[in-house]
Image (cartoon, rainbow, N blue to C red):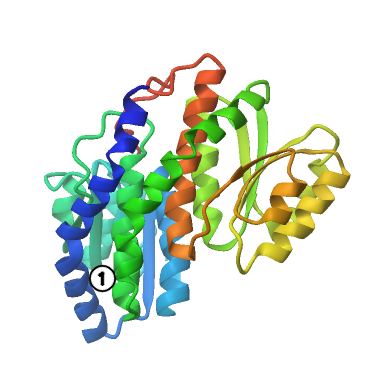
């Protein structure tokens, strides 16, 4: 099947390794956050790591009630600004730990006395060494250029941190993540069929809302790099504020719509899309939404934490299969290499 698929198959074990490696570390970080009465979190990352950071933002805010924002490296590296992170928990996420711009901002935060946390897959990397704390993804060498297993490991350790900061007893949900990966893998025949139906589609609008927004952006990235298709993600409510004018007959829309708090919103926009004769590809466990879809993949019912993991695996599989249907090799995306160095 290929390198990317083989690495997705290892994700249940990767998750278990990540949990084992970081349980004590997240407790140590939480203890210092509480001791110093830290009330703000700043997250930084690029690409897939930025998408995982967006998922973390939603969960640390909804579970722990701590506001979380995103640092933009150019503020420091291009404009030379000295942003004050002294009273922040500063979380830098990078699979390789070698991003120069991410390291520059974390170094600045260190000098200001922030609690800095590096989340990487390489304990010997510059970023891992620079952080006061290091959360090790423990994913093993990732050979696939399009990150899959390291992204799932990022979600795992970031969710562990969010849960620890919240004080809630939600680790049993994290222990269920390997099962969620296996459930998504079992959907490969249905996902492959959807990719076959979509093989002649070259532009996609991706819609979701809430905790799934990081997953939607991750799908956008994977469709860009693996299938060479133009894809743009919108939160469903943001989409109604202007971009909905893009919809006409034949426009291709992918909806990531787990049943839950956002179901009524999803149902409303899916109905409008159907009336306008858009092609709607829906991943959901909500029967009404699947009935409104042009093509649908029935997902297992999941809680919010688990849905981001289960749907992410399904999205990686879909991008991988669509790439192959279009005659491309998802293991060798053009113009790209494994480690991207940005300044």
Depth order, front residue of 123/166:
166
The quadrant holding residue 326 is: top right
On screen, residue 94 above or below 342: below
- Give percent across and percent down for residue 329: 44, 18
Q: Is residue 133 left or right of residue 87?
A: left
- Please tell me how crowded label 1 is: few (under 14), some (14-19), or many (20+) other residues with Cα within 10 Å: many
Residue 46 in sight here: no
- Give the residue at the far top of this rendering: 327
Residue 101: image location, x then y, percent: 32, 46
Quadrant of the snapshot with the C terminus? top left
**Total number of numbered labels?**
1
Say which residue appears at 61% left-offset and 51% top-offset. Answer: 284
Which residue is labeled 1 in the image?
A: 114
Q: Position of residue 25 (x, y in %)?
A: 17, 66
In the image, is 195 to the left or to the right of 266?
A: left
**The N terminus, quarter of image:** top left
Against 114, is 212 above or below? above
Report helix, strand or loop for mark 1.
loop
Provide residue 98's location: percent of width, then percent of height. 24, 41
Residue at figure coordinates x 22%, y 44% from the top left:
139
| Residue 10 visible in image | yes
Residue closer to the observer: 155 or 71: 155
Taking the spot 16% from the left edge, 59% from the top edge, the residue there is 20
Left or right relative to 336: residue 212: right
In this picture, is 97 found above or below 134? above
């Amino acid at each position: 099947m290929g390198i990317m698929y083989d690495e997705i198959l290892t994700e249940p074990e990767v998750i278990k390794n990540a949990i084992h490696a970081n349980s004590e570390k997240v407790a140590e970080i939480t203890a210092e956050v509480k001791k110093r009465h830290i009330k703000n979190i700043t997250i930084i990352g690029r690409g897939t790591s930025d998408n995982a950071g967006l998922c973390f933002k939603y969960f640390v805010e909804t579970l722990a009630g701590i506001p979380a924002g995103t640092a933009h490296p150019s503020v420091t590296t291009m404009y030379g600004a000295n942003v004050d992170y002294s009273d922040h928990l500063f979380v830098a996420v990078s699979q390789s730990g070698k991003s120069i711009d991410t390291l520059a901002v974390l170094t600045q935060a260190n000098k200001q006395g922030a609690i800095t946390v590096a989340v990487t897959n390489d304990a010997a990397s510059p970023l891992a060494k620079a952080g006061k704390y290091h959360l090790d993804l423990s994913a093993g060498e990732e050979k696939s250029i399009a990150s899959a297993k390291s992204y799932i490991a990022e979600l795992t350790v970031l969710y562990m941190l969010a849960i620890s900061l919240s004080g809630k007893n939600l680790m049993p949900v994290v222990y269920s993540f390997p099962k969620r990966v296996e459930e998504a893998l079992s959907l490969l025949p249905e996902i492959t069929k959807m990719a076959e139906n979509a093989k002649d589609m070259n532009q996609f609008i991706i819609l979701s809302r809430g905790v799934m927004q990081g997953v939607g952006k991750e799908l956008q990235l994977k469709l860009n790099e693996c299938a060479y298709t133009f894809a743009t993600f919108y939160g469903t409510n943001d989409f109604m504020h202007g971009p909905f004018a893009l919809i006409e007959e034949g426009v291709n829309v992918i909806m990531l719509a787990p049943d839950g708090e956002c179901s009524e919103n999803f149902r409303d926009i899916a109905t409008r899309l159907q009336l306008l004769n858009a092609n709607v590809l829906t991943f959901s466990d909500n029967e009404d939404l699947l009935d409104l879809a042009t093509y649908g993949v029935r997902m297992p019912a999941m809680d919010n934490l688990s849905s981001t993991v289960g749907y992410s695996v399904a999205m990686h599989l879909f991008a991988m299969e669509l790439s192959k249907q279009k005659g491309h090799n998802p293991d060798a995306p053009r113009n790209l290499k494994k480690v991207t160095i940005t300044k």
